C-alpha cells in the first residue's frame, strides 16, 4: 500500500515526460520498421512514388518535396520534420495532420517509432 502511494506520482511524472528524447532509437532496428514504408516512399532525391521522396526529410517543411502532389491538408500543415514532429505524426498520421492522404495507420509502438526515426535520420541524408 505504501509503495503504491509513493510511486504513483512518480509513474505519472515519468509517463508524461517521455516524448522523444529520453530513449534513443536504434537505426539498425529501424531499417526493418521502414520496410512497409518503402512501398510508397523512396529515400532517393526527386524519386516520388505513391508518397513523396523522403530524401532530405530532416529540417524540411511538410508538403514541400518537389513535384509531388500533396493533399491540401499536408500542403498547409506547416510542420518542420524532425525527431519530435515525426514521433507525433507517425503515431497517428490522421490525428496529427487531419485530412492527410497517407494510407497508413502509423507505427503505434513507441520504441519502433524511435527506431524508424533514427534510421530515417541517417538514410534520408
Ligand atoms: C500506402 C502508402 C504509404 C505508406 C505505406 C507510408 N506512407 Fe508516408 N506518405 C504517403 C503519402 C501518400 C503521403 C502524402 C500525404 C499527403 O499529401 O497528405 C505521405 C507522407 C509522409 C510524410 C510527410 C512527407 C512530406 O514531404 O511532408 C512522411 C514523413 C511519411 N509519409 C513517412 C512515412 C513513414 C516513416 C512510413 C512507414 C512507417 C510511411 N510514411 C508509410 C504514403 C505512404
Image (cartoon, grey):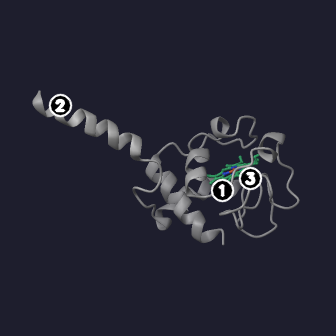
- Give the residue at mark 2: 4
x then y, percent, for residue 74: 77, 45
**Residue 122 sits above or below residue 91 on the image:** below
On the rendered structure, is 9 left or right of 108?
A: left
**Residue 105 sits above or below residue 56 on the image:** above
x then y, percent, for residue 107: 55, 46
Whether residue 32 is visible, yes or no, is no
Q: Earlier in the sequence, mark 3 or mark 2?
A: 2
> Alpha-carbon neighbours of circle 3 within 10 Å: few (<14), some, or many (≥20)?
some
> Alpha-carbon neighbours of circle 1 within 10 Å: few (<14), some, or many (≥20)?
some
Q: Quadrant of the N terminus?
A: top left
Instruction: Pick out the residue farthest to the left.
Output: 2
Q: CA distance from mark 1 to mark 3?
A: 7 Å
Q: Quadrant of the C terminus?
A: bottom right
- Give the residue at mark 3: 62
Task: Note whether ligand 1 is within 8 Å of mark 3.
Answer: yes
Residue occupying the point 67% across, 63% down: 59
Residue 81 image label = 1
Task: Note whether ligand 1 is within 8 Å of mark 1.
Answer: yes
On the rendered structure, is 115 left or right of 80?
A: left
* Residues at circles 1 and 3 in contact by the CB criterion of under 8 Å: yes
x then y, percent, for residue 37: 65, 54
- Would you identify the image quadrant in which residue 102 lies? top right
Q: Earlier in the sequence, mark 1 or mark 3?
A: 3
Amino acid at each position: 500500500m505504501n509503495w503504491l502511494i509513493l510511486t504513483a506520482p512518480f509513474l505519472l511524472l515519468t509517463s508524461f515526460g517521455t516524448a522523444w528524447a529520453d530513449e534513443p532509437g536504434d537505426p539498425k532496428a529501424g531499417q526493418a520498421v521502414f520496410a512497409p514504408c518503402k512501398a510508397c516512399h523512396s529515400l532517393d532525391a526527386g524519386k516520388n512514388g505513391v508518397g513523396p521522396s523522403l530524401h532530405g526529410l530532416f529540417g524540411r517543411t511538410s508538403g514541400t518535396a518537389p513535384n509531388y502532389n500533396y493533399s491540401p491538408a499536408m500542403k498547409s500543415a506547416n510542420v518542420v520534420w524532425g525527431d519530435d514532429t515525426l514521433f507525433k505524426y507517425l503515431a497517428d498520421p490522421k490525428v496529427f495532420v487531419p485530412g492527410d492522404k497517407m494510407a497508413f495507420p502509423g507505427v503505434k509502438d513507441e520504441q519502433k517509432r524511435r527506431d524508424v526515426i533514427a534510421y530515417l535520420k541517417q538514410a534520408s541524408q
